[in-house]
Amino acid sequence: MSFGAAPIGNIFRPISEDESRAMMATAWDAGIRSFDTAPMYGHGLSEARVGESLRWKERDDFLLITKVGRRLRPKKRSEIDFTPWVDGLPFEMIFDYSYDGVMRAFEDSNQRLGLERIDVVFIHDIDVFTHGEEQQKIHFKAAMDGAYRALEDLRSNGHVTAIGVGVNEAAVCHAALQHGDFDGFLLAGRYTLLEQDALDNFLPLCEERNAFVLVGGGFNSGILATGAKPGAKYNYAPAPQDIMDKVSQIEQVCTEFAVSLPAAALQFVVAHPCVPSFVAGVRTTEQLQQNIAWMNAPIPAEFWQALKQRDLLREDAPTPA
Ligand SMILES: NC(=O)c1ccc[n+]([C@@H]2O[C@H](COP(=O)([O-])OP(=O)(O)OC[C@H]3O[C@@H](n4cnc5c(N)ncnc54)[C@H](OP(=O)(O)O)[C@@H]3O)[C@@H](O)[C@H]2O)c1
């Protein structure tokens, strides 16, 4: 499991410095050694907090992932729209997928983190989810022409170990992998117990190209952790009825086999050979500890077979041994 550091960028509600430090310490003490952050998360707050908590750790003991594609520029707090972040750092965000913009953003991330190095850099949010149909085409082209070349240079000069793309859509990852020599991806919400369209094209190409896929949003932003209860979240908004219905059906199978839904959601994702880690976004130390326990909970093989027999899971989806 990796630590997803969007929540400590204060997404939707603030997390205090003490809570943030406690979560990072709990993650470290539990053996988590991979941390995913981004300049976007709290307009720099997440990178600052992650860097502070890891500052005095032995650098080779952990993996640090951040992203490029947004530059941060100082501005009066009162003039910044922080939505969906709360009390971020006083920087406005500007999309910039150009070569120079990415090089500058990379330098800025290094300063905010205050660590010896960054291991993995993803081009962030070049998807329709973020930009809409028309703008996405423009940003994707700019990223392949500029950001990709910048990251290639950083990799070939030894400044980073791996480069890739971090988005909410498998099709964009697939297009990027067809375009360039990417080492890996962060795919959010699109390979989960609830949806496996990434098995159509993207994951087979990753297998062929030996690319890794970190899965973020593995609870589809909440509903696979909470179950289909009123107010459950899917894609960061209240879940629509068809999603509630499908999760309820999966929950029925969980009940029959005495399996917890979030345990199944966590363990399913990392059963794919290209997926080394579930990037968990947690809001409290309790959620983090619970997720670690769920990751290790026993699940009978018959449970996965039952999901497939009832058309609740794709037949070709790898499941835990
Ligand atoms: N484009 C990208 O690169 C991209 C996009 C998305 C995510 N990510 C990465 O992936 C990470 C995780 O993504 P995510 O936070 O969007 O999705 P997620 O893991 O699907 O959902 C996280 C939410 O699930 C709920 N949850 C987690 N553990 C729980 C528990 N034990 N009990 C009850 N509820 C629990 C919490 O909801 P409540 O807050 O409601 O309690 C939490 O905020 C991010 O932090 C980020 O590092 C990257």
Image: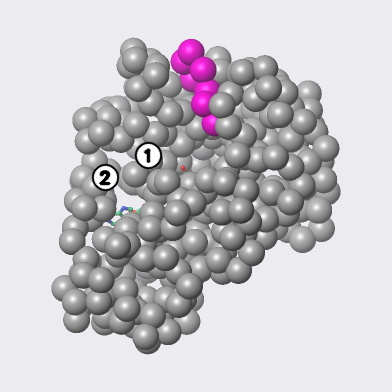
- Looking at the image, which residue is at 18% across and 61% down? 298
Give the secondary structure at mark 2.
Answer: helix
- Looking at the image, which residue is at 19% across and 81% down? 256
Mark 2, Cα crowd under 10 Å, few <14 / some 14-19 / many 20+, is many
Measuring from the top left, give residue 183's x and y in whole percent: 60, 39
Mark 1, Cα crowd under 10 Å, few <14 / some 14-19 / many 20+, is many
- Looking at the image, which residue is at 26% across and 53% down? 295
Q: Nearer the viewer, residue 21 or 278?
A: 278
Quarter of the figure with the N terminus: top left
> In whole angstroms, how far apart are the C-alphas of marks 2 and 1?
9 Å
Q: Nearer the viewer, residue 284 or 276?
A: 276
> What's the amino acid at mark 1?
Phe
User: Can you say whether 303 is above or below 67 in the image?
Assistant: below
Is residue 9 in sight in this rendering? no
Q: Would you name the residue on which mark 2 appears?
A: 288
Give the magenta part as a residue range. Answer: 112-120
Is residue 165 in sight in this rendering? yes
